[in-house]
Image: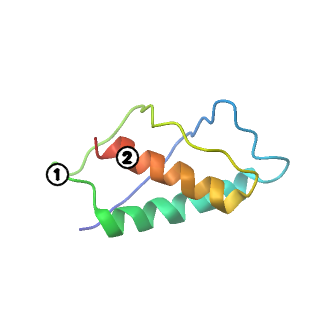
Amino acid sequence: MKVDLHIDRLVLDGIDPGANRGELVSAAVAAALEQAIADRGLGSVPVGGFAVESMRAPAIETTSEPAALGTAIAQSLHTGLTR
């Protein structure tokens, strides 16, 4: 299965990744979400794919470490996508 993922905007209510850390968090989200999809898939995906205009994903435990924060966000997004 080919997955083409594009996140236009990611809003993190109440989370400040810190100065100049947004790109690190973004890269960590992309890598962890790609791995989660490869490991666990997306459930039943319609032929031709799908788009999600907006989604409220489950809350996460926050951390100041960009890689860990990105992984937590990705796991939450994956859960939201596979509900």
Residue toward you, 11 or 40: 40
Q: Circle 2 — which element?
A: helix
Give the x, y percent position of residue 8.
52, 42
Give the residue at x 43% y 64%: 34
Q: Amino acid at mark 2?
A: Thr
Q: Which residue is mark 1?
A: 44
> Mark 1 is on which residue type?
Ser
Quadrant containing the C terminus is: top left
> Could you tell me residue 73's position as x and y percent?
54, 49
Q: Nearer the viewer, residue 68 or 33?
A: 68
Q: Residue furthest left?
A: 47
* Marks 1 and 2, how far apart at CA: 14 Å
Name the disc covering residue 82, or none: none
Question: Which residue corresponds to the image point at 46% horizontal and 53% vertical from the top-left?
Answer: 75
* Image vertical order of residue 26 relative to residue 17, above or below: below
Q: Which quadrant: the N terminus?
A: bottom left
Report which residue position mark 2 lands on: 79
**Residue most toward the right?**
19
